[in-house]
Image (cartoon, rainbow, N blue to C red):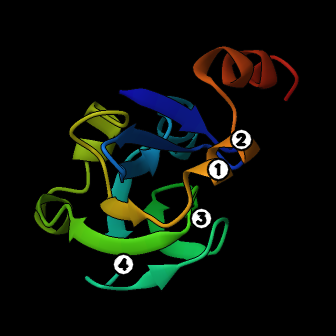
């Protein structure tokens, strides 16, 4: 399984053409206590870097952008009742949606974990 990041702090973990999508631990930490997650609709078709959903915390509200193009095939409904899962496990249990990836070549537009860690040092 490979993980990639965007400059807006979303991640996608890719396995067999499906990408699990969420926000990075850095983003969750910066947002503070997350109070609400707006999940995408099942079956929604998104393009890379288009708005996928939104997240709200005690500090701010942020749009979430899709790291890949494709169709939403699963959403993390547990976040409706417990948005704090994103704070507790941003890069694992706090995933937002699974996307059936339309074009894996788009992954070249994203950063690896190492590149993302270097990017964080510059902001």
* SS state under label 3: strand
Whichever of callouts 1 and 3 sits on the residue coming sooner in the sequence is: 3
In space, the residues marked 1 and 2 are separated at their CA atoms by: 6 Å
Q: Which residue is mark 3?
A: 65
Task: Tell which of 42 and 105 is nearer to you.
Answer: 105
Q: Are marks 1 and 2 in contact (CB under 8 Å)?
A: yes
Q: Sort mark 3 into few (<14), some (14-19) or many (20+) by Cα contacts within 10 Å.
A: many
Image disc number at residue 5: none
* SS state under label 4: loop
In space, the residues marked 4 and 1 are separated at their CA atoms by: 23 Å
- At horizontal 38% and vertical 46% (from top left) the residue drawn is 33
- At horizontal 33% and vertical 73% (from top left) the residue drawn is 72
Image disc number at residue 40: 4
Q: Which residue is mark 1?
A: 105
The quadrant in which the N terminus is found is: top left
- At horizontal 66% and vertical 14% (from top left) the residue drawn is 114
In space, the residues marked 3 and 2 are separated at their CA atoms by: 16 Å
Q: Sort mark 2 into few (<14), some (14-19) or many (20+) by Cα contacts within 10 Å.
A: few
Nearer the observer: mark 3 or 2; the answer is 2
Query: Seen in the image, is 51 located left or right of residue 85?
Result: right
Q: Are marks 2 and 4 in contact (CB under 8 Å)?
A: no
In space, the residues marked 2 and 4 are separated at their CA atoms by: 24 Å
Q: Are marks 4 and 3 in contact (CB under 8 Å)?
A: no
């Amino acid at each position: 399984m490979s993980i990639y990041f965007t400059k807006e702090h979303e991640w996608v973990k890719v396995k067999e053409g499906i990408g699990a999508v969420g926000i990075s631990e850095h983003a969750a930490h910066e947002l503070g206590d997350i109070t609400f997650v707006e999940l995408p609709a099942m079956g929604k078709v998104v393009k890379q870097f288009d708005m996928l959903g939104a997240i709200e915390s005690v500090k701010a509200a942020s749009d979430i952008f899709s790291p890949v193009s494709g169709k939403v095939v699963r959403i993390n409904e547990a976040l409706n009742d417990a948005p704090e899962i994103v704070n507790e496990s941003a890069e694992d249990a706090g995933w937002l949606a699974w996307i059936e990836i339309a074009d894996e070549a788009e992954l070249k537009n994203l950063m690896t974990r190492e590149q993302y860690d270097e990017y964080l040092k510059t902001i």
